[in-house]
Amino acid sequence: MALNRRLAELFGRNRASYELVTHPDAYTAQEIAERARVPGRYVAKVVIARDRDGSYVMAVVPAPERVDLSRLGRVSGRHGLSLIGEDEMRRLFPDCEPGAIPPFGSLYDVWMCVDPCLAQLDHLYFQAGNHRELIRMSYDEFDRLAEPFSGDVCLHECHALVG
């Protein structure tokens, strides 16, 4: 599988500036960072949760971090968040390999929140819809294309506030 079609079309329509980085097969965000020889904090990990009403939320955090669902709930205003399983992920993101979702919630009608730790970076890496390719993109370009929500509260367990 090559660069996700939806992503390629978005990039083409918007004349996006990016670099495609190939790496040996890897399945976890930290493993991807290691195999691509990229610091983990520069790799954007996508986590999908469902609220008690059945709506989905996409959280994007640095690869080494774990999403804190209570913080995500406070930031998003969603209640009863729980992580979704692989079958549900396949249904929501049919053109992506499981666990290789690019951080563009709008392409799938999913509300997306980016951890402010990523917004402090000059560039980031994220999966291209498969387990063999990453996209390297400036954070400003990513922000322009993805138009994510990003608050002042980190979405991961290690930090309370960015400041």
Image (tube, rainbow, N blue to C red):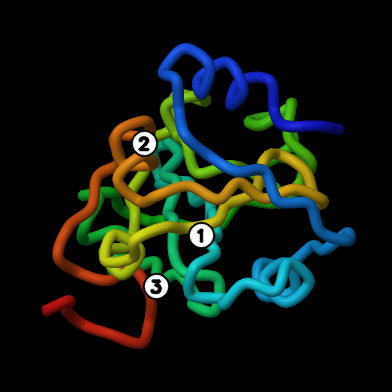
Distance, label 1 to label 2, CA atoms, is: 16 Å
Picture quadrant where residue 92 is located: top right
Residue type marked 1: Ala
- Expressed as whole percent of the image width and height from the top left, the position of residue 32 reads 72, 67
Q: Give the residue at x 88% y 59%.
A: 25
Q: Nearer the viewer, residue 143 or 137?
A: 137
Q: If the image is split into quadrants, where does the N terminus sit?
A: top right
Tell me which amino acid carries mark 2: Trp
Q: Position of residue 150 (x, y in %)?
A: 23, 52
User: Residue at position x 42%, y 56% from top?
Assistant: 81
Image coords of residue 110 (percent x, y): 44, 32
Dot 3 lies on which element?
A: loop
Cβ atoms under marks 1 and 3 closer than 8 Å: no
> Is 59 placed left or right of 34 in the picture?
left
Residue 55, picture quadrant: top left
Identity of the amino acid at label 3?
A: Asp
User: Is the residue marked by circle 2 packed among few (<14), some (14-19), or many (20+) residues within 10 Å?
Assistant: some
Q: Is residue 145 left or right of residue 2?
A: left
Q: Which residue is mark 2?
A: 111
Residue count near mark 3 (Cα–Cα under 10 Å), binned few <14, some 14–19, many ≥20: some
Above or below, 3 against 140 in this view is above
Labels 1, 3: front one = 1
Residue shown at 54%/79% (left/top)? Answer: 64
Which residue is disc 3 drawn over?
68
Comes first in the chain, label 1 or label 2: 1
Mark 1 or 3, nearer chain start: 1
Q: Quadrant of the C terminus?
A: bottom left
Q: To which residue does mark 1 refer?
A: 44
Q: Residue 2 lies in what quarter of the image?
A: top right
129 left or right, relative to 23: left
Q: Nearer the viewer, mark 1 or mark 2?
A: 1
In 3D space, how far apart are the residues under numbered discs 2 and 3 (Cα atoms)? Answer: 17 Å
